[in-house]
């Protein structure tokens, strides 16, 4: 059972590497003064500290770390304590080369970088176990330590013989017999039949890389292997005696791991958020970041932690722009608005050398507190103090958008209509954005999530139906839900094997049609949808579509819109069927954003969903957090112009002004009793 | 001597993989019903079936295959039987790693994909021999089997020690002594002199990749090695007792092999045609596909087989568009128009899994015959029945365009004026298109073809003169032919060694000029050619040129056009010399398409060549097949607008309407007695 | 001490490979006739001749070479004799694989190409030593030999164990203790601490490639290793008894080596110049080539040799254009104008085969002297004869632009504001061009150059301050110099470790400001600078800036221009402080070219610098060479239009016309007594 996370105040602070300044006690002392000035109450230490903690094999030195934690705790600054497994010392790589990863071509990497160890290596696991346990024994009960931070940004994969052997075992566990695997993977194609599990190799561009089921199972295996490693780290902590909760910091739309599987392993989800503000209109970036916040929050459907964010410009994007005044505060409060109980930064004090020395930090190489960045960090700290009562409150969403990682993997690997890009993530984002613009909280879910609490579920491009997902969708609609399906749905089962007899598989009756063909458009082509006179939703606009246009044969659905050109002009592009107590919509083509905004404006009403604000101006973001007693309504203006958002009746202003107009990047937080 | 191919009817059908459905007899049964419905009379089986034919080393299972062939034959459906060597079973790769190819960096590939075996490996040859012989013994005399299909789409190369040793032997055979090789390859350059054949290594980006003669000989060796492998397969078939003819399916403009060398090995040429219809104007795609048909037909100057084509969208292009209604019929009849005696598809029944599961098929995952694709396939079947008498008829061409693979290799490898692109293939296509637009059959030939039957020969960018090709060209003109030469001709001999003393080598007197310099233009630059008043052809238009502009010094040729700008304004861009009984033209620059259309409109008349139609509207394609008794005139409108093409006197309509106007994609086939 | 170079006449000639024509004595004889016709007096032989000099291990054959040198000398043609180490024979690579380089992935390359030997390999050094010594013994005192040409275009690096071991020794020599190295490299970051020098590995994309100090030291080591190899070659020559001076041919803006370190090793600098004339306006190419000439000249602040240039089109650029008439003469005289005492070509006689057979040559495959190229080469030869007295004259520059290779390496490796491109070289070029357009000689210097002779020093983007370079800059201004600094200056020390306490480090007081933040702009963004009313320079124009905009906090500087938009509108973009007897300017953003032209038009006057011409028209290039008695003023019109440049009083015309107007590509050389 997950550990309870309840700090009673927002965590403010971030990654801190005092081991880089051990010979500068003056700087370490000054750091704490600055932390207090900026209302920083939490630091993450120990990330990448292994070489200082165990400078030679078996010779440990934790004294400096204890001292740091002591010093911080004296000033009421708490520590998130990291295990050091994100980077190993050179001596270990030299003595035990097996700790280094192998590339897909089966050659071993050299020492360097970080995050590139084999998760299977017994030696690596043994070394990690030992140091984690020791950290737990020495510091796991320190009153200043509040949370375990396992390693750092897990990712990547290893193709060494040890990992491949684990993969074979994993497959045997999954399929039981080689005949079952052959049949599921369709290995008869190109004479790829395996005679035994021993014959299976991991995918590689130097060998097999187009057997989709193999690719997919390998990706699943990598997630499971990573989780197995995380569990090993947690077990070491528990052996060391600490019962503190654990987290691991996840990454933006990370495609290498299926985070839904992390739900039961982490006590709290945390993630690292680095939006590219000011590259395009801030509102578009806010939609993008908001969806990621909601994706992370939906993993456990609990408040999460913003573990990293940049107090200034990053240094690893192609172009690293400064955040304009007010941007960091708005971005920080957006995290809180979407369910974060923290605002943490990478990094508190800039490193003097190596690859991240120019990454933004609360304290920079200049070293003073009279910088714009330091002042804006302080402003965030003050805001979090003011908002303290919101901490720990929950979010409920009437709508959900399906965005499943396994489905994404399968679509990206498809050799199908558009090998350049199927635009799956973009299709999800369009629906998410249109629902959010109705002013609704929106969950971003996987195929493992229960649907029964939602009024509206959008499942765009649900290409792969895992474990009979068609039944869940059908039941959701039967029970009164509004289900929005699209082109390229229900084509394959969980091993990427085509479902025979017509698609969307298992839903042809619920949707009232079956698909016939799908046309791929070049980037310079488009088609459009023309509304049918008297369609029951009352849609009157004509909208363009691009990329993919499915041709369907309707059995018993209402046709609301039809294609406007090409040889399939006049064929359906939007249909509806009243099914059970609910509604099933089918969108045949990759429609433009404006279509979805029109569409959801009407279907949300049809579904009887009530939003907190009656009218949401373009560019304004609205979310609702609530606890047993209160509702907290976050209103943020991400547009580049002022927007009028009158305070609705019954609310008082908890944060921000009472003026009708919100300036660009201004945040207002309202509160009312339930 | 080549086996006689005479089926008396067009083959209609294609690749079929029943081994994927052995556990679904219902589907196998239904397939045959559908085949009959669609007038399918031929299937290709056994491609990639090795793992089912020999599931364990030495344990063969051919019963299922015989059953399939029996069942088909009962319904008068004939079988093209493939050898399974296109993909080897996993057990073989595991037990004998030598069957896997080595990459240019001399590392061995892993098992995966297809077509990636070493053609030298004694083990692979032994295993292939054994199964081929067995197939021949068991099924090579089956009355339902009509043709052998050797492996599949031969291609690629192996850099293993065995192949490199064969390369050394090949070089020794070719050059005799190492001194001769050193001199031919100019190895004194950069101290590359070899002391013995043992010192020679295959080219590699990790070693030597800029010794052009080495690169060129390696490519020639790869063709010879592939042919040696094919001969080994044929010998196994013959040992097994079958005397049926053999083919191997070739590929679109495939650059890895010199198909002209396949002439004497295959009994019939077959190829796989996948044009990207609807990406640009269909007429342009038709010109492109038409040239490939003519290239394949010209290998043996005999009717060929269209071995693969897509009944719907492919799945391996970046964007895989649907074929619009009528496109597949037009494309199929285009193949017939250019000399094909078949229309065969990849694939008859869609695979349920793996990398080609979304490739278009006659029968798809839905599995019914009520699809657009199935109906259009049936339409093709009906057309072929109607055209039965055309099958086996020949084609004669008054004009030929030289497109030699070795010349292409040499030009692509040139470090010369334009390393970005010399536009050799495009230069060939321009001349081919302009000749075709005169309504003529055109052969696409290599330097091995005899020229004596042609009235017009275009030899664009004949950079490399193989085996004294200059003499053939000279003789052709002397004897009354119209010879069209261009810039970048006659620079090197067959080892890419420069010919001294002036170029075009051996033809300076015949052309009446020698070249001095060649200017390369950036993509954004162009020049133009201005006609000389009173030029004998009567050219009055001004035409642009790009990419390459040669500067020549005329000795005794007529200058018809001159450059319009740059420091060489006024120097010749088109010349003519009456030579022997013929004409020699020299085009100094990469002229635009319109120039060639104007030019050939005039030179075809001058050469006294008579086209079947007096006027060919833009976008219309005309070809002529004939047998001892009849001429068959194919007229296809590939334009996007209707075109008027009145039926000329003396012809009757064999296929299509008698209306004056041809709709877009419409085909009309006329017939007259000879 | 450097050997004296004094030939009393310009060297004219170039690379010559007679070993390719040993079986064609007729051609060798004809070559010499042609050389004399074209006033060619110098050839470089022996480059890449090893396989002919030592066809089998230990079996030498130098007779042919002596014969060639004799024959040339008889006709008063002198020889620059090359060591053959630029390419090794095949027998050596086969017998001693260690002579071949290893790639960064630690795999060894195969034989092929050139320039790819290990500089550490004892075998390679032994073999090179032996043949160099033998050449010296046999030919090093030949009266026809005037200069040693060491190897060819040194470049590249080797990652073999031998080289890595040398790297470790180099580091130990540099840092003394591992603790010092750890501290300098900031290895605490990501747990990269080394316990001993033995643990250090060369950087690799397969291991560590983001530890900037490691990358930087590796590059420095590569330069030192190369120089060590060159010294080895020189010592062999000396052992052989020859005391002739030595050179090695350097390359255009070559980033792989730090040429400033070559100063004390070479007796004379020579380089290979291949500008891409006619790609853009010739004037822009002339600026680019001119800066490289000045960079090469500044290494030793002595006349240099143009060792290679192309008499026609190259064959290794993407597009190899012909040089338009007059271009080669203008380019050749430009080299002389910037301090070259030679015009040498690659190549005198075109190779008949291999990868450079289409590279332009004085004598081509056609083989006659009636070509445009041959005539233009002859024209150059005649000009050099006419200019004989200029040979050996020096150049003095009142201004210098800092362009340091180590600084470039560091900036290119920065993970900072713009990882796409920081535009360092472009920033240097802008300043160089603006200074040159004032008609001044300009030195292009490194951080090792003394500054005391300059009036103006531009040090753009001096990111890395080597060895307390801030002191040199400060002293320069204190003593009366005009110092122009820019954004992104003084951030790190020589190990790329950030300097704490504010930047530009050590110069905040001299500049009168400190930097606060730096904004990166997307390629489509720009800002602009607005002049402050009454600024002391009188600037009135508004200029755009792009890419990088620094925000500074002024303490006591005059603000001359301010940003025009974004949140930092109104903050300084150009400042000035009178410091000591001099001036310090600070440019905060990447300003457009026009700004620098305006700016230097004013600051040159302020600094009291007098240019030889009062007015320099756009597109005209002016340089001044001088000897004890005379000044030689070179005026070249690189614009595409005629330009009026009256002959100033006191000068006579040494070369060219006296007309007021210079035609495009025309050169005039004036002379006056001192």
Image: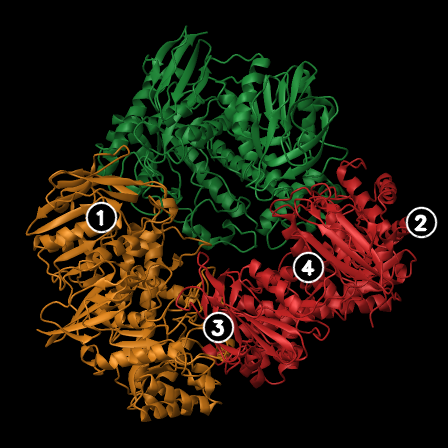
Chain colours: A red, B orange, C green
Same chain check for tags 4 and 2 = yes
Q: What chain does badge 3 belong to?
A: B
Residue C460 falls in which quadrant of the image? top right
**Mark 2 closeness class: few <14, some 14–19, many ≥20 residues within 10 Å:** few
Residue A565 in the figure: left or right of residue A203: left
Q: CA distance from mark 3 to mark 1?
A: 45 Å
Read off the residue under disc 1: B595
In-front residue for pair B344/C100: B344
Element under label 2?
Answer: helix
**Mark 3 closeness class: few <14, some 14–19, many ≥20 residues within 10 Å:** many
Q: CA distance from mark 4 to mark 3?
A: 32 Å
Read off the residue under disc 3: B355
Q: How far across and how far down the image is residue A643, in percent?
A: 69, 47
Q: CA distance from mark 1 to mark 4?
A: 58 Å
Q: CA distance from mark 1 to mark 2?
A: 88 Å
Element under label 3?
Answer: loop
Q: What chain does badge 4 belong to?
A: A
Disc 4 + disc 3, Cβ < 8 Å: no
Read off the residue under disc 4: A292
The quarter of the picture where the N terminus of chain B appears is bottom left
**Mark 1 closeness class: few <14, some 14–19, many ≥20 residues within 10 Å:** many
Q: Taking B351 as reference, is A206 above or below it?
A: above
In-front residue for pair A388/A81: A388
Q: What chain does badge 2 belong to?
A: A
The mark found on residue A74 in the picture is: 2
Disc 4 + disc 2, Cβ < 8 Å: no
Mark in front: 3 vs 1:
1
Q: What chain does badge 1 belong to?
A: B
Q: CA distance from mark 4 to mark 2?
A: 36 Å
Same chain check for tags 3 and 2 = no
Q: How many marks?
A: 4
Mark in front: 4 vs 2:
4
């Amino acid at each position: 059972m997950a550990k309870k996370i309840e700090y009673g105040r927002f965590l403010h602070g971030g990654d801190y590497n005092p081991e880089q300044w051990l010979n500068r006690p003056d700087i370490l002392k000054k750091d704490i003064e600055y932390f207090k000035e900026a209302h920083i109450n939490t630091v993450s230490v120990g990330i990448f500290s292994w070489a200082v903690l165990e400078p030679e094999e078996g010779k440990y030195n934790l004294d400096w770390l204890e001292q740091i934690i002591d010093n911080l705790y004296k000033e009421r600054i708490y520590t998130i304590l990291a295990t050091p497994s994100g980077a190993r010392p050179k001596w270990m790589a030299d003595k035990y080369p097996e700790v280094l990863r192998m590339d897909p071509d089966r050659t071993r990497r050299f020492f360097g970088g970080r995050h590139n160890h084999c998760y299977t290596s017994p030696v690596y696991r043994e070394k990690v176990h030992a140091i984690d346990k020791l950290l737990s024994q020495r510091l796991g009960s320190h009153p200043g330590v509040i949370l375990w931070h396992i390693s750092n940004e897990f990712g990547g994969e290893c193709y060494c013989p040890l990992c491949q052997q684990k993969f074979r075992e994993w497959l045997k566990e999954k399929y039981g017999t080689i005949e079952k695997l052959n049949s599921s993977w369709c290995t008869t194609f190109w004479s790829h039949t395996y005679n035994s599990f021993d014959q299976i190799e991991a995918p590689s561009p130097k060998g097999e890389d187009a057997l989709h089921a193999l690719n997919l199972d390998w990706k699943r295996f990598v997630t499971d292997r990573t989780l197995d490693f995380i569990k090993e780290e947690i077990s070491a902590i528990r052996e060391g005696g600490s019962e503190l909760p654990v987290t691991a910091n996840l990454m933006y739309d990370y495609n290498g791991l299926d985070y839904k599987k992390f739900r039961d392993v982490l006590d709290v989800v945390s993630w690292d958020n680095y939006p590219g503000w000011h590259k395009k209109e801030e509102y578009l970036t806010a939609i993008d970041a908001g969806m990621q916040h909601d994706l992370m929050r939906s993993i456990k459907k609990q408040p999460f932690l913003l573990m990293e964010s940049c107090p200034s410009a990053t240094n690893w994007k192609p172009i690293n722009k400064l955040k304009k005044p007010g941007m960091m505060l708005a971005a920080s409060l957006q995290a809180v608005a979407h369910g974060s109980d923290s605002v943490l930064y990478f990094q508190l004090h800039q490193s003097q050398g190596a690859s991240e020395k120019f990454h933004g930090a609360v304290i920079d190489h200049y070293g003073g507190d009279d910088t714009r960045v330091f002042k804006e960090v302080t402003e965030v700290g003050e805001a979090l103090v003011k908002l303290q009562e919101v901490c720990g409150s929950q979010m409920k969403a009437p709508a959900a958008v399906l965005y499943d990682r396994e489905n994404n993997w399968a679509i990206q690997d498809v050799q199908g209509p558009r090998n350049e890009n199927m635009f799956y993530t973009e299709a999800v984002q369009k629906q998410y954005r249109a629902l959010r613009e109705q002013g609704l909280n929106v969950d971003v879910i996987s195929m493992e999530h229960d649907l029964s609490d939602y009024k509206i579920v959008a499942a765009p491009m649900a290409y792969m139906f895992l474990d009979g997902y068609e039944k869940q969708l059908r039941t959701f609609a039967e029970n009164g839900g509004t289900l929005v399906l699209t082109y390229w749905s229900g084509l394959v089962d969980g091993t990427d094997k085509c479902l025979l007899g017509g698609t969307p598989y298992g839903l042809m009756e619920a949707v009232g049609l079956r698909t016939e063909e799908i046309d791929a458009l070049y980037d310079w082509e488009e088609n459009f949808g023309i509304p049918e006179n008297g369609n029951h939703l009352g849609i009157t606009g004509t909208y363009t579509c691009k990329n993919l246009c499915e041709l369907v044969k309707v059995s018993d659905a209402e046709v609301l819109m039809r294609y406007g050109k090409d040889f399939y002009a006049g064929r359906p592009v939007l249909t509806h069927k009243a099914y059970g107590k609910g509604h099933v919509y089918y969108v045949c083509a990759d429609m433009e954003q404006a279509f979805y905004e029109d569409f959801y404006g009407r279907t949300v009403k049809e579904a009887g969903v009530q939003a907190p604000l009656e009218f949401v101006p373009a560019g304004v973001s609205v979310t609702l957090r609530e606890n047993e007693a209160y509702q907290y309504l976050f209103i943020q203006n991400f547009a580049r112009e002022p927007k009028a958002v009158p305070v609705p009746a019954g609310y008082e202003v908890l944060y921000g002004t009472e003026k009708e107009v919100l300036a660009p990047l201004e945040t207002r937080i309202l509160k009312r009793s339930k």
